[in-house]
Amino acid sequence: MTERELFNTYNKEIYRTCYFLLQNAQDAEDACHDVFVTVFQRDFRKVVYLKAWLMRITTNHCLNLLKKSRKKREKQLQIWHLYEEARTSAKALETIVEEKSTAADWQKLFKELPDKLLVVITLRYVNDLTTTEIANVLHIPVGTVKSRLHKALKIMRNKLQEEDFYYLKGENPIEAYGR
């Protein structure tokens, strides 16, 4: 396989993984290019499990970027929460309830996950890797992958239930709020 064939075959998948981990299109594009530079500097033709190897390089690179920008992300998240509080406090409750099912809410959920859980969720549900493939990519036991998947889904479920408790029970949130 030539470098061009490798790039054409895996570019979209690596970009998608970078995007879901970094939550930013420009950062994902930069990371994707960095990953291919790293791959092309190594002898990828001798690798047996090429996709797993590429995903390993991709996730490691993205995790390194996330670690470097952790403080920056925390400050941005604090500012975002302050902005959201100010914005939503001025809105009618009906408007807030209608906006709960947006993609931004899902992104917020993903951003609240610890990096280790975010990586596993991304590899499983965005890249459709099996738990065995994820274990190979991350060099961790399959049981750990399953545990992290379970924990991530549980955290997300709890966050959704906290935010949409009345909605999940089938009650009118306007009436329930007035209790």
Image: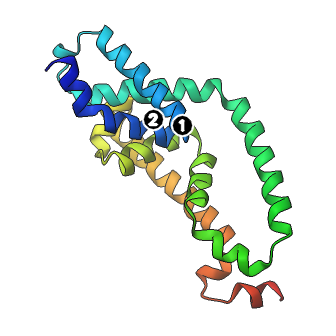
Give the class, few, some or many, for how many residues have Cα within 10 Å of label 2's Cα (few <14, many ≥20). Answer: many
Give x and y (percent) for residue 80.
76, 49
Mark 2: secondary structure = helix
Q: Residue at x 83, y 52 (%)?
A: 82
- Could you say where residue 14 lies in the image, as x and y percent from the top left? 36, 34
Query: On screen, 41 above or below 159?
Result: above
Please name whichever residue, 95 or 168, is drawn nearer the observer in this view of the structure.
Answer: 95
On the image, numbered disc 1 is attached to which residue?
Answer: 22
| Residue type highlighted by circle 1 | Leu
In-image side of 142 versus 161 (left or right): left
Q: Position of residue 77 (x, y in %)?
A: 73, 44
Which type of secondary structure does the marked residue at label 1 adopt? helix
Amino acid at circle 2: Cys
> Residue 84's quadrant in the figure?
bottom right
Point 83% across, 88% down: residue: 178
Residue topped by disc 2: 18
Disc marking residue 88: none
Residue depicted at x 57% and y 65%: 102
Q: Residues within 10 Å of mark 1 (few under 14, many from 20)?
A: many
In front of the other: 8 or 129: 8
Q: CA distance from mark 1 to mark 2?
A: 6 Å
Q: Quadrant of the N terminus?
A: top left
In this rendering, the answer to whether 104 lies above or below 133 is below
Q: Is residue 177 visible?
A: yes
Classify residue 34 by image quadrant. top left
Q: Is residue 139 visible?
A: no
Q: Are marks 1 and 2 in contact (CB under 8 Å)?
A: yes
